Image (cartoon, grey):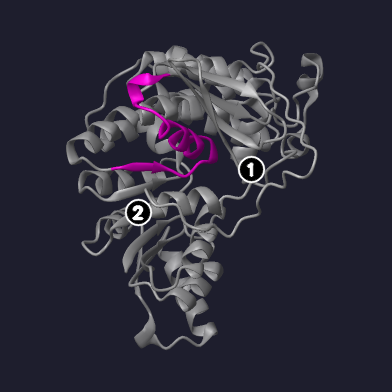
Amino acid sequence: MQMLSVLGSTGSIGVNTLDVVRRWKGRYGIHSLVAGGNVKLLAEQIFEFRPRLAVVADEGGRERLIGELRALGLAESDWPQLEFGAEARVLAATAAEVEFVLSAIVGVAGLEATYEAVKLGKRIGLANKEVLVSGGELVMAASRAARTELLPVDSEHNGAHQCLRAGKRNEAVKLILTASGGPFRRTPFEDLKTVTPEQALNHPTWKMGPRITVDSSTLMNKGFEVIEACWLFDFRADEVEVVVHPQSKVHAMVEFNDGSVITQVCATDMRMPIQYALTYPERADAPVPKLKWDEVHSWDFHPPDWEKFPLLGLSYQAIRAGGSAGCTLNAADEVAVEAFLKGQIPYLAIAATVAETLERVPVTHPATVAALLEVDRQSRAVAQEWISSSFALSL
C-alpha cells in the first residue's frame, strides 16, 4: 500500500484526492492530512481515513479539532498525532513512511513542506502553483539533485504532461495552454473600470476559491501557469503560448518539430488529473464522465487580449527575469486581489499594483526557502505601501 501525505486536505483538490483514494481501497493509505482552519471537515476525514498525523494552521485550530473529534465519538486511542504550524507541515511531508505528497496548500504556506519533500526524493503531485511560481529555481534544482518527479495535477499542466509522452522532449517546439477567458472575455476595456468583486467571482466554468477565481478573471492565473510550465517542462517563455478556449475541454496542446500537434481533451473533473499523477505511468479507469462523441461539439480558440489583461504579459516578464521575480509577482498579486475583494482598490488597480511592485523589488536568486520567504515578505510590504499611498481615501 502506497502511503500518501495530503497537504491541503480540506480544499477542493484535497477532497477530490481523498475521493480517488476512497475508490482505490487497498492501493493507497493516508499517512498525513494537513489543513488550515476547516477543522470540522478535517475531523470527518480523520474519522474515515485514520491517518497517523493531522496538522492544522495554529494551536487554536488544534484545540477545535480535538473538540470535533470528541463530538464524532472517535476514541482518543484512535486519534492521529495532532500538530500545528509550519514545522508540522514539513513533518507531514517528509515522514519516512510517506511515498507520495499531494501538494495543494494555497499560497506560499505549502512551499517549505513541498521543497523538503522534494529534497528527500518523495514523489510529488503538484497542485500548488506558488511552489514553482515563487520558488521554481530553488525547487527544480532540488528535484534534479534528488532525481524525483513532480507530477502536475493542474488540468493544463497535467494535459501537457500527457501530450509530451507522444514524443521526445527535444522534439517538442511549443506548448499551448488554454484559458477559459473568465467572466470578462467579451467585456469592453472601459467597463472593467467598474467591475465589482461579485462580478469577478462569477466564473463561467469553474467553482474555485476567491483568489484563484479573481486571478482567472484577470488571466493572472494563466500567467502563473506559463511560469509553472516553463519550470516543469524546461520550456523558454517564447515556447509557451496561451489561447482562449471558452469550452474548457482542451486543456493543453504540444506542437512537435514535424508540425504535429498533440492535444489532451477530457471532461472538467479534477479527479482525472489527480488519479493520473497517483498512478503514473499506469493509466487506470477513472471515476469521471466521458466525452460523448455522438453529440455535436463546437470548440473555439482565440488569442488573448494583451491590453485588456496586462497581468498575462507581466507573468511573461517575470519568467524571463527569472530568480525571485515570480515570487514578487505572486506576492504582489495576492496583496492586490485581497485589497480588491475588500473594496480598497478598483479592479484595474490589481495589475497596476503588480507592475509597480515588480518595478520596485530587485530580482535576486535565493538559495534557501528562508531567503525566498523574505523576498515574499518584502514584496508584500512594497505592494501594500503602494496601495496605501495611491488609494488612501479608499482605505
Q: Are marks 1 and 2 in contact (CB under 8 Å)?
A: no
Q: Classify mark 2: helix, strand or loop.
A: strand
Residue where numbered disc 1 is placed = 210
**Residue stretch rendered in magenta on the structure:** 149-172
Residue where numbered disc 2 is placed = 101
Above or below 302: residue 53: below
Nearer-N-terminus badge (1/2): 2
Above or below 333: residue 35: below
Question: In this orientation, does residue 314 appear?
Answer: yes
Check disc 1 and give the amino acid type: Pro
Residue 282 % position (x, y): 39, 52
The residue drawn where x is 61% and y is 15% is 310
Quadrant where the C terminus lies?
top right
Tell whether 162 sits left or right of 272: left
| Residue 179, quarter of picture | top right
Quadrant where the N terminus lies?
bottom left
The residue drawn where x is 77% and y is 31% is 298
Above or below 335: residue 80: below
The residue drawn where x is 54% and y is 51% is 272
Above or below 192: residue 17: below
Residue 130 vs residue 383, the one in the foreground: 130
Q: Classify mark 1: helix, strand or loop.
A: helix
Gap between marks 1 and 2, in whole Å?
Answer: 25 Å
